[in-house]
Amino acid sequence: MRFQSPQLGAMGVTFTIMRAGQVASLIAAIGMCANFISNIATAEHNPPAELVGTLTVAVTSVIYVAITYILYYDNMLPLLLTAILDSLLLIASIVVAALLGKPLSSLNCSILSTESALAANPSVMSSGGLPFAGTVITQTLPYPSFVALDQATCYEIKTVWGLSIALCVLFGFSGLVCVGLWHRIRREAAAAEPKDIEFEG
């Protein structure tokens, strides 16, 4: 069942709002993750897998959101398929939020240093200056150590975590809206079908 009209009342407006919120959240997350990865690369270390995975999911998602909204606007959106894909992105967002939030839920950013650890000392990892005792020093910066480098990093990664949680809600609602639009179009199409007229002899 294809989308018939971009003007389908409250559900159509809701779909547009969900997509706008998704684009805004994804672009913000992409910008912050890209900045993190750039700073870590400048310090000659490999970024944590959690950041790389978040950036990959975010870039893929923003491309998907843009394409589906263009199809929606051109009355060509396959609603059931879109609902399924939104559900998959919901699952991906839940995984990302869980991975990002694991060391953040108990971390108090206000007690960390206000000085940027990477900017002040790019070799902080190799010098043994990691915030967590017992961390194994490797070329790849461990994610729990990265989020506790300084206040700015902690607050920014918590923002990315919050955006991931927001995306869980947005993709969940947009998937439900797609199902609602599909049902509404089916109902309207069935009502518009010509009915057989019985003639009495």
Image (tube, rainbow, N blue to C red):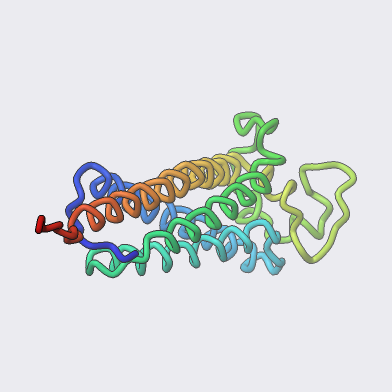
**Closer to us: 71 or 152:** 71
**Closer to us: 152 or 169:** 169
Please report the residue visible at 29 percent of the width from the left and 45 percent of the height from the top: 14
Relative to 132, is 64 on the left or the right?
Answer: left
Relative to 5, is 134 on the left or the right?
Answer: right
Q: Position of residue 69 (x, y in %)?
A: 31, 63
Please report the residue visible at 63 percent of the width from the left and 58 percent of the height from the top: 51
Q: Position of residue 165 (x, y in %)?
A: 53, 42
Dividing the image into 4 quarters, which one contains the N terminus?
bottom left
**Closer to us: 166 or 142:** 166
Relative to 97, is 139 on the left or the right?
Answer: right
Q: Position of residue 15 (x, y in %)?
A: 31, 50
Relative to 170, is 193 on the left or the right?
Answer: left
Q: Position of residue 81 (x, y in %)?
A: 45, 63
Please report the residue visible at 64 percent of the width from the left and 68 percent of the height from the top: 41
**Closer to us: 191 or 24:** 191
Q: Is residue 25 above or below residue 56?
A: above
Dividing the image into 4 quarters, which one contains the C terminus?
bottom left
Which residue extends farthest front? 201
Labels in figure, total: 0
Which quadrant would residue 26 be assigned to in this image? bottom left
Please report the residue visible at 25 percent of the width from the left and 50 percent of the height from the top: 12
Q: Is residue 33 above or below residue 103?
A: below
